[in-house]
C-alpha cells in the first residue's frame, strides 16, 4: 500500500507540473501558439466560427471550403469553433487576452451589437476595403446589417414555423396564418419555442414579435401566447426533438426544414413551413476580421472567395441556407425545397443597439414569473 | 524507523499538500476570481448587488416584500409567491422527497434480496449520471410524452391518459431518475454493513421484527439516506438544462438565471446569484455534517443474510415486484426509449444511425468529432480522474472523521465543488486557466488533457468523500487505538482495519465519480483547447440535428461503454479482496 500511496502522490504531482501548463511571452503581438505560419512556410488563416459550420450530422461546409480555398491559394485554413461561439472571443477581449484568430465567420447582428456594447469604441472587429471584394455589390440589400460594413453578409435563412399538417387534419383546422392565430383556441398547446436566452433562433423570433406588436404590446402578446400553452424550451435541439416526438404540432425553426426532411425521406406533411402574416425573419450571417489581425490581405482574399457566386451557391447548399448574393445560382430541386416569405423582417444594427438586453430581460422575467 | 513510518511521515503530508494544491489551482482560484465580482465593484468592496437580489420580488417573491412590509407574511399565508429562489428550493425539496421514496425500496432490494444479476443492477445505478440532459429529455418525452409509452399503454387499457410534459411533476421525476439510484446505492452500501448480530440480539431480547428494524437498522441507515438526500437536494437545486428541456422557462430555476446573466455579460447578477446558491448549499451541508458527526455505531463483522427474491409468495416479495414495475417505467423506460430512437428511421427499423457513426469514424476531417476518439478520451479521462479523485476523496474522509476544531468547516468546504454553480466554474476555468495569468512578462495557461483530468477529479471527489465518511465514522475508535498501541503505523491501520470496512462506500463513490467524469461537459469543452480533447457527451451534442438518430446512436455507445466500465469497476473492487 505504500506503493499505492506513492503512485497517488506521484501521479498528482505530475498532474501539477504537466497539467498542460504553458508559458508564452506576452510581448509577442497577436501571434499565439496556433497562428503564424505552418511548417512549410504556408501562411495560416485562423477562422473562428460556430460548431455546425464545420461539424454537423447532416452536411457542413467547413471541410469543402477549406479544401477548395487551399487548392486555389497558397494558404492554410485553420477552423476554430469554441463552444461559447462569439462569446468566447468577447471574453478574451474583456480579459485583455489576445484573440489569436483572424476573422469570425457566422457573425449575427445580435453578436455584433453585443460586442460593440461591451467594447465601446475599441471595436472587436475592423473592416475590409470593400474595393477588394469583387462581388460585394451583389450582396442583397435586405441582408446588410452593419452600417460600418465590418460584417459582410455571406448567408441567410428564414426563421419560420414548421408544422405538422397531419395533426391539423386530424383536428380539422387549417394551418395558422397570423400571430394572433397562434394565441387562439384551435392552436392551444400547439407551439414550441427555443428559449431566446440560449438560442439565436428563439431570440430572433422574439424580435419578430416585437416588430409585429411593438415594444409596448409584445409582452401582452406573449402572455396570451403562453396562456394558450406555448412552451419555451431549452434551445433549438430540445424544441425540435419535442416537436419530432409529436408533443406539439408547431415549432419555431427554419424555412429550410424540407431540405433535411427530403434528405432523410421523412413525411413532408410533418415538415410544412408557415410564415405568420406572410413574413419571415431573416437570420443573417456575416464575416468580419478581428481588429489586430496581421493577415488582413489573406482574410480579404478569403472573404472575396466566400462571396464568389459559385462558392456562395455551394456553401448555401452545404450549410442548408441561402446565399447572401443575388447572382448565385442554386439547383432547382434545392431552391424548390427552401421556402421564402413574401415579406422579410429583420432588426438591423440600429434597431438592436441599446434595446436588445432590455427587451430580453423584460420578457424573461415575465415568463419565469408565471 | 520502518518504511511504513517513513511513508506515513512523508506520504500523508505530501498527499495533503498535493490535494490542496490541486483544489486551489483547479477550483478555488478559478472560482474565486469570478465570484469576487459579486462583492467588488470598481475596486471597492460592496454588498450592493447581493442586497439588490435579496430585496427583489422576482428572486424572492413575498419574502422580499416582507423585508419592507412584514404583514405580507401572514396576509398571504400559506399561498406565498415564492420568487425564483423560492421556487428553486421548492422543486428541489419535492425532487428530494421523490428520490428518497423511489430510492429506498431500491436499497432494500439491493441489500436484502438475492437474485440473478443483482450485482450488475447495483453496478448500473450510476448510469443515469453519464447521460446528457438532452438524451434524458428525449427518453422522457418518448416515455411520458403525449404519444409516449405510458400513454400508449393507458390508452390500450382504456384508461385516461396523463399530461406530464411541461409540468413540475416531470421535472421532479427527471431529477429522481438521476438521483434515486444514487440514494439506493449509498443506502444499500450502509445496509450491507449492518451487523446481523445486533438485530439478532434485539430479537432475542424480545423485540418484534418492526421494532428491531426501527431501533437497530434505521439509525444505522439514516446517515447514508441523509447523505443521498443532501446530494439530491443540491443537484436538483443547481439543475438547469433538464428543467428547461422538459419543463420550459416558466419553471425556471436560479441556475437558469446565472446562465442567462453570463450570456448577457451581466457578471454582477450572475455571480451574486451564484454566491447566494453557494451560501445556501453550504449552510445545508454544514447542518448535515453537524448531524453526521453525532453518529457513531459499530461496524459490520457479519452482514445480514440475503433473502432469495424468487420464492414462495410473501408480502415483501409482492411489494418488491410492485416496485420493480415502477422502477422499470421510470429508470428503464427512458433508456429503452433512447435505444429505440437510435434504431428507428422514417420507415421503421434501421441501422443507418450506427452506419453514420462508422462512416464518421472513417471519413471525418481532422477538425471534426470522431466517435471512437470520443470513446477513448472519455475512458482515459474517466480512469485518470478516478486515480486522483478516489485517494483525494478517501483522504478528506479520513481527515473529516478525526476530531479537531473547525473540521466541519473544512468538511463543508470539501463539498464546495458540488455547491458552486457549474456555469461559474466553467467561467472560472476559462478565465483563470485557459486565458491564464500574466506573470513577469509571460502568460501562464493551464489546458489540455491533463487539466481536463484534474478538473474532473476535483468535480467528482466529493462523491467519494460523502460515500465513505458515513461508513468510516462508524468504525470503532477503540479498535483503531488498540491497533496503534500495538505498534501498527497509521497507514497499516488505514489499510488493515479501515479500508476493508469502507469498501462498499469506496466502490459506490468510485462508480459515481467515474460517471460524473464521463458525463461532464462544460469543463471538458472549455479545457480542450486543441480541439482533440472531446468526449462522448461532446460527440452527442455535435450529432444533434433534425433527426434524433445520430445523437441517440452515440448515446447508446455511451451507455454500453459506461455500463461495461461500471461492472468492471465493481468486479475489480470486489476482487481486490476488501469486499466480504
Image: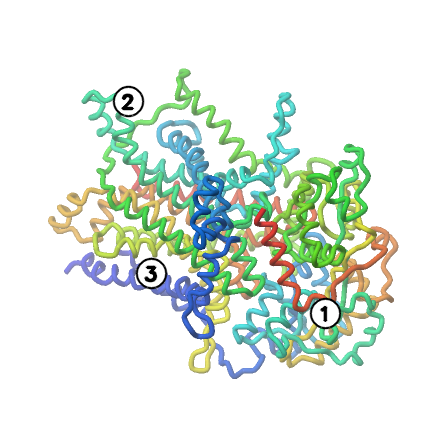
Q: What residue would you read off at disc 2?
A: B209
Mark 2 → mark 3, Cα distance in angstroms: 46 Å
Marks 2 & 1, CB-CB < 8 Å contact: no
Q: Residues within 10 Å of mark 1 (few under 14, many from 20)?
A: few
Q: Chain of mark 2?
A: B
Residue B378 rendering spot, x and y as whole percentages: 50, 53
Q: Is residue A4 visible?
A: no
Q: Residue at x 26, y 21 (%)?
A: B208
The chain identifier of the residue carrying mark 1 reads: A
Quadrant position of residue B111: top left
Q: Position of residue A35 (x, y in %)?
A: 60, 75
To which quarter of the image does residue A2 belong?
bottom left
Residue sitting at 33 percent across and 62 percent down?
B20
Nearest-to-viewer mark from 1 and 3: 1
Pick whichever, A101 or A33, lies toward us: A101
* Foreground residue among B167 and A73: B167
Amino acid at each position: 500500500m505504500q506503493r499505492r500511496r506513492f503512485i497517488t502522490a506521484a501521479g498528482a504531482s505530475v498532474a501539477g507540473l504537466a497539467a498542460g501548463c504553458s508559458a508564452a511571452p506576452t510581448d509577442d503581438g497577436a501571434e499565439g501558439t496556433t497562428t503564424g505560419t505552418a511548417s512549410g512556410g504556408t501562411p495560416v488563416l485562423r477562422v473562428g466560427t460556430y460548431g455546425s459550420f464545420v461539424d454537423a450530422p447532416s452536411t457542413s461546409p467547413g471541410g469543402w471550403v477549406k479544401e477548395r480555398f487551399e487548392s486555389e491559394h497558397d494558404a492554410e485554413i485553420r477552423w476554430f469553433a469554441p463552444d461559447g461561439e462569439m462569446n468566447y472571443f468577447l471574453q478574451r477581449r474583456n480579459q485583455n487576452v489576445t484573440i489569436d484568430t483572424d476573422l469570425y465567420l457566422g457573425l449575427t447582428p445580435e453578436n455584433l451589437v453585443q460586442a460593440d456594447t461591451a467594447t465601446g469604441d475599441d471595436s472587436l472587429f475592423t473592416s475590409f476595403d470593400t474595393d477588394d471584394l469583387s462581388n460585394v455589390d451583389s450582396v442583397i440589400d435586405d441582408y446588410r446589417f452593419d452600417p460600418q460594413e465590418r460584417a459582410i453578409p455571406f448567408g441567410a435563412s428564414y426563421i419560420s414555423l414548421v408544422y405538422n399538417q397531419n395533426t391539423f387534419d386530424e383536428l380539422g383546422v387549417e394551418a395558422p396564418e397570423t400571430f394572433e392565430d397562434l394565441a387562439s383556441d384551435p392552436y392551444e398547446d400547439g407551439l414550441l419555442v427555443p428559449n431566446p436566452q440560449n438560442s439565436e433562433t428563439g431570440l430572433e423570433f422574439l424580435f419578430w414579435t416585437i416588430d409585429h406588436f411593438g415594444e409596448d404590446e409584445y409582452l401582452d402578446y406573449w402572455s396570451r401566447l403562453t396562456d394558450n400553452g406555448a412552451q419555451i424550451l431549452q434551445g433549438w435541439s430540445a424544441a425540435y426533438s419535442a416537436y419530432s416526438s409529436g408533443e406539439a404540432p408547431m415549432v419555431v425553426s427554419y424555412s429550410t426544414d424540407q431540405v433535411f426532411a427530403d434528405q432523410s425521406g421523412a413525411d413532408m406533411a410533418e415538415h410544412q413551413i408557415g410564415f405568420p402574416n406572410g413574413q419571415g425573419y431573416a437570420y443573417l450571417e456575416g464575416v468580419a476580421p478581428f481588429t489586430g489581425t496581421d493577415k488582413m490581405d489573406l482574410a480579404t482574399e478569403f472573404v472575396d472567395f466566400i462571396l464568389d457566386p459559385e462558392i456562395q451557391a455551394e456553401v448555401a447548399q452545404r450549410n442548408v441556407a441561402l446565399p447572401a448574393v443575388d447572382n448565385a445560382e442554386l439547383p432547382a430541386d434545392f431552391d424548390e425545397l427552401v421556402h421564402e416569405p413574401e415579406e422579410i423582417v429583420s432588426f438591423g444594427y440600429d434597431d438592436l443597439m441599446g434595446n436588445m438586453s432590455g427587451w430580453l430581460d423584460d420578457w424573461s422575467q415575465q415568463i419565469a414569473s408565471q | 524507523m520502518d518504511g511504513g513510518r517513513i511513508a506515513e511521515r512523508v506520504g500523508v503530508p505530501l498527499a495533503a499538500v498535493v490535494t490542496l494544491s490541486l483544489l486551489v489551482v483547479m477550483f478555488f482560484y478559478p472560482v474565486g476570481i469570478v465570484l469576487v465580482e459579486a462583492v467588488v465593484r470598481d475596486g471597492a468592496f460592496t454588498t450592493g448587488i447581493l442586497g439588490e437580489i435579496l430585496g427583489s420580488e422576482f428572486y424572492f417573491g413575498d419574502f422580499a416584500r416582507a423585508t419592507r412590509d412584514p404583514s405580507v407574511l401572514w396576509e398571504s399565508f400559506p399561498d406565498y409567491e415564492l420568487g425564483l429562489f423560492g421556487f428553486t428550493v421548492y422543486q428541489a425539496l419535492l425532487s428530494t422527497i421523490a428520490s428518497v421514496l423511489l430510492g429506498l425500496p431500491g436499497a432494500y432490494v439491493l441489500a436484502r434480496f438475492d437474485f440473478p444479476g443483482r450485482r450488475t443492477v447495483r453496478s448500473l445505478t450510476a448510469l443515469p449520471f453519464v447521460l446528457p440532459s438532452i438524451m434524458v429529455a428525449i427518453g422522457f418525452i418518448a416515455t411520458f410524452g403525449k404519444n409516449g409509452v405510458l400513454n400508449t399503454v393507458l390508452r390500450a387499457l382504456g384508461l385516461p391518459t396523463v399530461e406530464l410534459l411541461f409540468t413540475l411533476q416531470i421535472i421532479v421525476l427527471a431529477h429522481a431518475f438521476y438521483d434515486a439510484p444514487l440514494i439506493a446505492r449509498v443506502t444499500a452500501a450502509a445496509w450491507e454493513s449492518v451487523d446481523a448480530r445486533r438485530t439478532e440480539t434485539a430479537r432475542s431480547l424480545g423485540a418484534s421484527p418492526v421494532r428491531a428494524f426501527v431501533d437497530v437498522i434505521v439509525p444505522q441507515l439514516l446517515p447514508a439516506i441523509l447523505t443521498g438526500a443532501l446530494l439530491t437536494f443540491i443537484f436538483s437545486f443547481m439543475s438547469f438544462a433538464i428543467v428547461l428541456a422538459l419543463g420550459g422557462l416558466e419553471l425556471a430555476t436560479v441556475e437558469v438565471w446565472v446562465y442567462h446573466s453570463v450570456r448577457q455579460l451581466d457578471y454582477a447578477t450572475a455571480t451574486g446569484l451564484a454566491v447566494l446558491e453557494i451560501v445556501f448549499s453550504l449552510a445545508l451541508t454544514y447542518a448535515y455534517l453537524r448531524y453526521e458527526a453525532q453518529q457513531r455505531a459499530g461496524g459490520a463483522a457479519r452482514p445480514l443474510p440475503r433473502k432469495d427474491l424468487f420464492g414462495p409468495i410473501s408480502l415483501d416479495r409482492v411489494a418488491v415486484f410492485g416496485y420493480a414495475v415502477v422502477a422499470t417505467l421510470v429508470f428503464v423506460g427512458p433508456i429503452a426509449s433512447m435505444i429505440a430512437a437510435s434504431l428507428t428511421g422514417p420507415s421503421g427499423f434501421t441501422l443507418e444511425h450506427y452506419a453514420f457513426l462508422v462512416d464518421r469514424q472513417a471519413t471525418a476531417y481532422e477538425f471534426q468529432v470522431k466517435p471512437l476518439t470520443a470513446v477513448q478520451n472519455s475512458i482515459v479521462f474517466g480512469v485518470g480522474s478516478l486515480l486522483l479523485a478516489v485517494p483525494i476523496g478517501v483522504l478528506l474522509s479520513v481527515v473529516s472523521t478525526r476530531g479537531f476544531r473547525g473540521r466541519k468547516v473544512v468538511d463543508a468546504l470539501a463539498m464546495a465543488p458540488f455547491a458552486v454553480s457549474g456555469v461559474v466554474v466553467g467561467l472560472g476555468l476559462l478565465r483563470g486557466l485557459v486565458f491564464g495569468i500574466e506573470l513577469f512578462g509571460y502568460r501562464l495557461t493551464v489546458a489540455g488533457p491533463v487539466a481536463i483530468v484534474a478538473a474532473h477529479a476535483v468535480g467528482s471527489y466529493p462523491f467519494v468523500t460523502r460515500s465513505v465518511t458515513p461508513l468510516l465514522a462508524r468504525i470503532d475508535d477503540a479498535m483503531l487505538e488498540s491497533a496503534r498501541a500495538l505498534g501498527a503505523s497509521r497507514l497499516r491501520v488505514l489499510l488493515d482495519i479501515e479500508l476493508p470496512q469502507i469498501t462498499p462506500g469506496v466502490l459506490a463513490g468510485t462508480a459515481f465519480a467515474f460517471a460524473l467524469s464521463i458525463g461532464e461537459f462544460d469543463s471538458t469543452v472549455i479545457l480542450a483547447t486543441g480541439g482533440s480533447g472531446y468526449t462522448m457527451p461532446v460527440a452527442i451534442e455535435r450529432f444533434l440535428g433534425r433527426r434524433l438518430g445520430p445523437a441517440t446512436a452515440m448515446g447508446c455507445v455511451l451507455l454500453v461503454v459506461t455500463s461495461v466500465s461500471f461492472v468492471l469497476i465493481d468486479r475489480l473492487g470486489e476482487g481486490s479482496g476488501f469486499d466480504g
